[in-house]
Amino acid sequence: MDTLDQYRDVVYKILSQYTPLMSQSGITSTVIISEDRNHFIVINEGWEGKRRIHNLVFHAEFRDRKLWIHHDGIDHGITEELVAAGIPKDQIVLAFHPPHIRQHTGYAVA
């Protein structure tokens, strides 16, 4: 199996563990994966009383064989779990940080 496919499986497995925990009465968390398996999105959707909930919780993309995390709204973030599961820090770009900050994160710059 290709390393990139292994990384995709890791991301899906970790996100799938979180969605049941984030779902609550009237609100469902769902993992959405693009057809090419390069985009991973988690959304919350439902109703909280009379208020409609539909928001982005997480978005990551495989770009140039690296995992770009665009948004991580999971309580404590999942980056450390990705590393513990075998995705090296130099293959993860914390895209939510400005480019001039990334060099100080310990993760890939781009």
Image: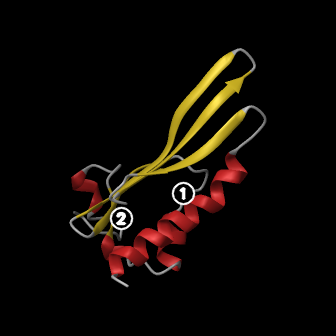
Left or right? Give the position of 30 relative to 100. right
Q: Position of residue 29 (x, y in %)?
A: 62, 44
Q: Quick one: SS at disc 2?
A: loop
- Cα–Cα span, label 1 and label 2: 14 Å
Residue drawn at point x = 35 percent, y = 64 percent: 105
Q: Position of residue 103 (x, y in %)?
A: 26, 64
Write down the quadrant of residue 39 in the picture. Answer: bottom left
Which quarter of the image is occupied by the C terminus?
bottom left
Residue drawn at point x = 70 percent, y = 52 percent: 20
Q: What amino acid type should be assigned to the residue bearing mark 2?
A: Thr
- 2 up-or-down from 69: above or below: below
Mark closest to the chain's N terminus, 1 or 2: 1
Q: In this rendering, which labeled residue sits more in front, label 1 or label 2?
A: 1
Contact, mark 1 vs mark 2 (Cβ under 8 Å): no
User: Quick one: 106 or 10, which is closer to the camera?
Assistant: 10
Q: Quick one: SS at disc 1?
A: loop
User: Quick one: 88 or 10, which is closer to the camera?
Assistant: 10
User: Quick one: 16 or 73, which is closer to the camera?
Assistant: 16
Q: Position of residue 48 (x, y in %)?
A: 72, 24
Q: What amino acid type should be assigned to the residue bearing mark 1?
A: Gly
- What residue is shown with label 1? 77
Within 10 Å of disc 1 (Cα), the crowding (few <14, some 14-19, many 20+) is: few
Left or right? Give the position of 62 relative to 28. left
- 15 up-or-down from 84: above or below: above
- 6 up-or-down from 35: above or below: below
Q: Residue furthest top?
A: 50
User: Quick one: 88 or 26, which is closer to the camera?
Assistant: 26
Which quarter of the image is occupied by the N terminus?
bottom left
Residue drawn at point x = 35 percent, y = 81 percent: 3
- What residue is shown with label 2? 105
